[in-house]
Amino acid sequence: MSRPPNRATLFAAFLSIGLSGFGGVLPFARRTLVERRGWMTAEEFNETLSLCQTLPGPNIVNVSVVVGARSGGWTGSLAAVSGLMGAPVVIVLALAALYDRFGALPAARGAIAGLGAAAAGLVAATAARMAEPLLKPGHLVAAAPVMLAAFAAVGLMRAPLPYAMLLLAPLSIAMARRLRP
Amino acid sequence: MSGSGAVLAGLAAQFALLSLLAFGGANAVVPEVHRQAVSIHHWMGEQDFAALFAISQAAPGPNVLICTLVGWRVAGVAGALIATLAMCGPSCLLTYGVAKVWDRHRDAPWRAAIGAGLAPVAVGLVLATAYLLARAADSQWRLAAVTVVSAAVSWITKWNPLWCLGAAAALGAAGAFS
């Protein structure tokens, strides 16, 4: 473990994390924080991540809050989050402005159609990777029905998310409690 | 559309609520963002939503950028900033507060149960996101094939997702889907 970073270093590190990842930046966060900067061990990263995945909100944003807070209190969190979000927000707005300006051109329309189709596939793969550890034999038996229920309620029946969460989350947590050894 | 105060306040309230419901990250609330933006408020059409999501994936950075773009479509740059701040702010505050007490309860059984219980819900929600995006984006069989191939490649290999996005965009620019 190297010594805790100051705010400028935190900002710079999360700036590079924000700019390096496409369609999710967690792998880059791990590489930067654990391997390149040595601010946390792999175990610490995993624990931080598991906390941040349990809490609501964009996972990587939560990770930056925790890492920032550890070394610089709330201003450290602010430095980390603004480093993470600042550049991507500017870039995505520039891309969107280009889309509005040139989106009607046939080549741009085709490119956007291809991008959209590929992006849907990437999200499906994310879901598959998230599901893998839950569907292994010996793990939580009830994972599959809960997954299907959440998918059907929100994806097929288009139920409002707050109601779906209010129903499914307590149910699933209660089942997880009972099924755990 | 320019951002009147009421519109901005509505955006802020909606994304602040979603921030606290986003178990499983930003991808898990995309179905709700889609429902609000397309079905309820008619801020944009199905195709436009799919295009904005595609752009958010083609930009570097966290998945939460789809919220930035929905805010932008509704109320320009002010809307983009408000939506982003509202989507990140409440969950950041919660995380900041909880991180301090969390370590003390590292081995508490309720902690493991919450994590284990929320995980399958999150998977179902991300799956719903994929389904809705595919439904919006795959207007013909070639595009559906792109979705399937990109899902398979991204699941099986560890390649940078940019390869899938880039190849699909290049195919489209060359007229493969027209």
Image (cartoon, rainbow, N blue to C red):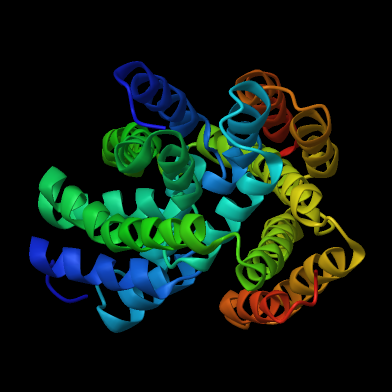
Q: Residue furthest right?
A: B141
Tell me the quarter of the picture where residue B23 sits: top right
Out of B144 and A15, give the one closest to the viewer.
B144
Residue A181 visible, this orientation: no
Out of B169 and B20, give the one closest to the viewer.
B169
Residue drawn 46% across and 47% down? B69
Q: Position of residue B176 (x, y in %)?
A: 80, 77
* Vertical side of A1 occupied by B61: above or below: above
Tell me the quarter of the picture where residue B104 sits: top left
Residue B140 vs residue A116: left or right?
right
Q: Position of residue B160 (x, y in %)?
A: 57, 80
Q: How many marks?
A: 0
Residue drawn 58% across and 23% down? B41
Residue A122 visible, this orientation: yes
Residue B31 vs residue A85: left or right?
right
Residue drawn 71% across and 30% down? A172
Residue A110 vs residue B115: left or right?
right
Out of B99 and B21, give the one closest to the viewer.
B21
Residue drawn 82% across and 27% down? A157
Q: Position of residue A41 (x, y in %)?
A: 34, 71
* Vertical side of A4 occupied by B130: above or below: above
Residue A104 vs residue B64: left or right?
right
* Vertical side of A47 occupied by B119: above or below: above
Q: Position of residue B125 (x, y in %)?
A: 69, 41
Out of A178 and B170, give the one closest to the viewer.
B170
Image quarter in which the C terminus of chain A is found = top right
Image quarter in which the N terminus of chain A is found = bottom left
